[in-house]
Image (cartoon, grey):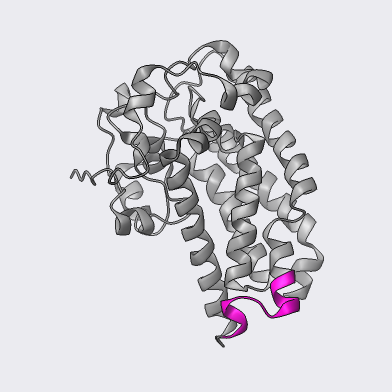
Amino acid sequence: MEDLLARASEIYAVDYFGAIIVVALLECIVPRRAAGDALTLRWTSNFGLAIISTVLTRTVFPAFGLMGAALSHQYGIGLMNYVAMPQWMGIVVTILALDLAAYGQHYLLHRVDWLWRIHRTHHSDNHYDFTTAARFHPFEAVITGAVGFAAVIALGAPPAFVFISTLIEAASSFFEHTNIRMPRTLDRLLRFTMVTPEMHSIHHSKSGGDSQTNFGAIFPWWDRLFGTYRDRSSVSDDAMTFGVDGFEGRRHQMLHWMLAHPFLNEATDAERTGKPSLVAPPAASIEHD
């Protein structure tokens, strides 16, 4: 495990850029939907946003959860410093706990108005491909860093366990946002253990409350457990559209406008009234054969 951390930067770079290369090739070979006429603008802006978010969060929260893991280990804080378990079990518990924390954060990002104003930068992408995984406002990146830091401190997971979880989350994020056509049978099988592109694309749909379902990051189990799982979109696959009402214009795919999204009031009444409040029950699961 010490060797893993000693080469953390190199390993993470291989994981991050390796995932990008693989999913980009898949999108070229078996695309699910047409790329659209703003591909270059979107890709440039989405990754530009990722660079800004990375610089900011590295300044505010250096190494994210790894710093929290180091502190919890140094001062004996957190559950895993008091409960003995085999290494393999500790890794599994860490991955599951941090993924559950990510699910909870994502749920609140859609239910609390000021958090939604930040998160809608991600949802305002009017196409769906692997670069959407990089499209998060810097404010949300800071929130994610803070939540991850707190979750790791409470869990008390060793730095190596947290790093393994980070590697899986990064690769999963690019995969679940990939614009690829997958056989329905394969998709249904994979959904037992992971969030698939088809499952997560429903979350980005503008139709019928789809965006209030399928909040999972790595695993689909939290959505099934808490009643936010949706098997199919409320519309046919071919009729599915993406984005946020009021943010359809080309300018909203430009980097400087994306940075301004939390401060804009361009959303329509449909968006404001269509988003459930914090006290609203989760969307019902919809199952189709």
- Name the chief secondary structure element in magenta: helix
Q: How many marks?
A: 0
The N terminus - image quarter: bottom right
Q: Quadrant of the C terminus?
A: top left
In which quadrant of the rendered view does residue 136 lie?
A: top right
Q: In the rendered image of this protein, does residue 210 appear above or below residue 150?
A: above
Residue occupying image coordinates x 57% and y 54% = 169
Answer whether residue 119 is visible to the viewer in this image: yes
Within the magenta stretch, is there residue 79?
Answer: yes
Q: Is any atom of residue 178 visible in this view?
A: no
- The residue that appears at 58% across and 69% down in the rendered structure is 154
Quadrant assignment, res 52: top right
Q: Which residues are magenta?
A: 71-82
Residue at (48, 15) in percent of width and height: 248
Image position of 17 (left or right of 26): right
Q: Farthest residue toward the bottom?
A: 84
